[in-house]
């Protein structure tokens, strides 16, 4: 099974996983947070995406991406705020061992789990900041014109042999 990977698919997959963990009693934001946003709510944003070029062969090339996404939780509690935030940390930690990358094709949901390498948790001014750090290896097919590649190889061999014989 081939899963498509894009920034929007990753963010959508995180939001989908949040809805599976917390249900519809929360509001989920994947874009900018509006001025008068609803509480309790979660906001998902990409912090970084570092791409490293991997192996390149005749038929495929690999790209290793290291992502960091942040889930912010805004509580609606006026008292017991830390207790509410700590409960969310526990649920998020157990619910994000893996990120299920979701693709929807013709109403069919395809999913592939991707391991979360690291989780970092902070709170500031009664806002939980829950960071997910994870790798994704992308395999991209190469479109190599084998006829042109063979002609080039033959040309290089002939040129090399002519130069070698001319010495």
Image: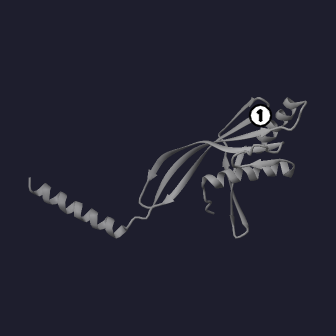
Residue 93 screen position, x and y as percent: 76, 39
In terms of secondary structure, where does tag 1 sit?
Answer: strand
Q: Position of residue 58 (x, y in %)?
A: 41, 60
The answer to whether residue 120 is above or below residue 163 is above
Compared with 21, 107 (above or below) is below
Q: Residues within 10 Å of mark 1 (few under 14, many from 20)?
A: some
86 left or right of 118 in image: right
Depth order, front residue of 106/28: 28
Residue depicted at x 23% and y 60%: 156
Q: Quadrant of the N terminus?
A: bottom right
* Residue pictured at 49% horizontal, 52% vertical: 62
**Camera-nearest residue between 21 and 62:** 21
Q: Residue at x 87, y 49 (%)?
A: 25
Task: Check the image and report above or below for 115 versus 2.
Answer: above
Q: Quickly name the residue at label 1.
A: 127
Residue at 60% across / 55% down in the picture? Answer: 6
Q: At which x and y percent is residue 12?
A: 70, 53
Extreme front residue here? 35
Give residue 123's quadrant in the image. top right
- The residue lying furthest to the right in this view is 79
Q: Is residue 78 left or right of residue 138?
A: right
Residue 80 x %, y %: 90, 30
> For residue 71, which quarter of the picture?
top right
The extreme left residue here reads: 167
């Amino acid at each position: 099974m081939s899963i498509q990977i894009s920034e929007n698919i990753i963010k959508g997959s995180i939001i989908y996983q949040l809805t599976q963990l917390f249900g519809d009693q929360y509001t989920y934001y994947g874009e900018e947070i509006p001025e008068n946003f609803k509480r309790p709510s979660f906001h998902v944003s990409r912090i970084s995406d570092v791409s490293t070029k991997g192996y390149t062969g005749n038929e495929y090339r690999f790209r290793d991406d290291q992502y960091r996404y942040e889930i912010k939780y805004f509580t609606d509690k006026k008292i017991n705020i830390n207790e509410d935030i700590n409960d969310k940390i526990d649920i998020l930690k157990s619910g994000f061992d893996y990120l299920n990358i979701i693709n929807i094709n013709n109403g069919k949901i395809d999913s592939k789990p991707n391991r979360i390498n690291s989780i970092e948790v902070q709170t500031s001014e009664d806002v939980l900041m829950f960071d997910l750090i994870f790798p994704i290896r992308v395999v991209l097919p190469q479109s190599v014109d084998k006829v042109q590649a063979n002609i080039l190889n033959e040309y290089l061999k002939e040129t090399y042999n002519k130069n070698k014989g001319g010495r």
